């Protein structure tokens, strides 16, 4: 049975950026949404194929093997992890744990909760969990549209040419962040999630303040007409910079 189209696109990103090292200990930041669920399915199937191949050829070599788990960072205003999705993680042989973080009590007097603040707090907990449990690679579910929306936000709001790297090696920690969905457009993820019948969980946060992200999404749609090819060209432009024609 041929693998889904989206898997082939993930394969290319993993190969192009050498995302997974032999013997890696990988942690998925599971949100309960379609993006991180796709990561779990892809890497669960990849590990299964790898082990089947080793068994078929009677190899005992494990240097290309990797281990993978997932953690759900649950905030004080988020739902429990969807039990139907949890069953899928079990089916894909990916252990799933939940870590609770009270983000509201961390907000300093005079400040308010925001999506950006909450995201930072959850990222800190994700890194802390990875460090405490010996992981060296964290997988995040940012896709192509996320990368380009971030680029647009930084350019139009900060005057800064910056997006999301496919691989980020921390200087302070023996950890790297990896984004295997780097080439995958959100429309294809939605299509795949629908075909698989995955249930979606939406944030129940009453402090949502992500108007900048929504504006960037609209600008991206205008720039590309929502076409995958145009989005790929925008991403490719970040690697083809002609400094002679820039300030």
Image (cartoon, rainbow, N blue to C red):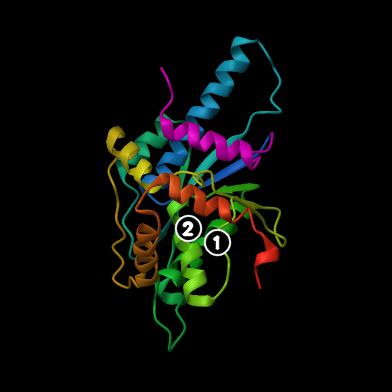
Element type where label 1 sits in the image: loop
Q: Where residue 223 sits in the image (x, y, percent)?
A: 40, 59
Q: Is residue 196 left or right of residue 22?
A: left
Tag shown at residue 163: 1
Dot 2 or dot 1: first in sequence order is 2
Q: Give the image location of residue 153, x and y in percent.
A: 46, 69
For the C terminus, the image quarter is bottom right
Residue 31 is covered by the magenta coloring: no
The picture places residue 69, in percent across and down from the top left corner, at: 52, 41
Give the image location of residue 11, x and y in percent: 54, 34
Q: Quadrant location of the N terminus?
A: top left
In the foreground, 167 or 136: 167
Left or right: where 223 falls relative to 125: left
Depth order, front residue of 204/216: 216
Q: Residue at x 36, y 49 (%)?
A: 33
The CA span between labels 2 and 1 is 7 Å
Residue at 33% x, 53% y is 80
Residue at left offset 63%, top offset 53% = 240
210 to 58, vertically: above or below: below
Residue 135 shows which numbered tag?
none
| Residue extent of the magenta highlight | 1-22
Residue sitting nearer the eye, 82 or 157: 157
Q: Say if mark 2 contacts mark 1, CB within 8 Å.
A: yes
In the rendered image, which residue does mark 2 sit on? 148
The reply to whether residue 141 is in sight is no
Alpha-carbon neighbours of circle 2 within 10 Å: few (<14), some, or many (≥20)? many
């Amino acid at each position: 049975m041929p693998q889904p189209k989206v898997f082939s696109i993930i394969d290319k990103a993993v190969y192009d950026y050498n995302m997974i090292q032999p013997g890696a200990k990988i942690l998925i930041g599971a949100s309960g949404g379609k993006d991180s669920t796709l990561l779990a399915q892809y890497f669960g199937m990849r590990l299964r194929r790898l082990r089947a191949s080793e068994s078929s050829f009677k190899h005992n070599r494990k240097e290309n093997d990797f281990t993978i788990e997932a953690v759900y960072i649950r905030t004080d205003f988020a739902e429990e992890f969807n039990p139907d999705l949890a069953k899928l993680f079990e089916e894909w042989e990916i252990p799933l744990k939940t870590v609770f973080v009270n983000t509201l009590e961390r907000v300093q007097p005079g400040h308010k909760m925001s999506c950006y603040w909450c995201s930072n707090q959850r990222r800190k907990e994700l890194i802390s969990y990875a460090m405490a449990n010996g992981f060296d690679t964290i997988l995040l579910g940012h896709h192509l549209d996320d990368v380009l929306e971030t680029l647009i936000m930084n350019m139009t709001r900060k005057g800064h040419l910056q997006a999301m790297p496919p691989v980020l090696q921390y200087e302070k920690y023996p950890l790297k962040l990896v984004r295997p969905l780097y080439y995958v457009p959100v429309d294809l993820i939605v299509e795949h999630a629908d075909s698989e019948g995955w249930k979606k969980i939406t944030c129940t946060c009453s402090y949502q303040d992500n108007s900048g992200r929504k504006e960037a999404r609209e600008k991206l749609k205008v720039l590309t007409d929502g076409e995958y090819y145009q989005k790929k060209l925008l991403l490719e432009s970040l690697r083809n910079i002609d400094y002679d024609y820039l300030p």
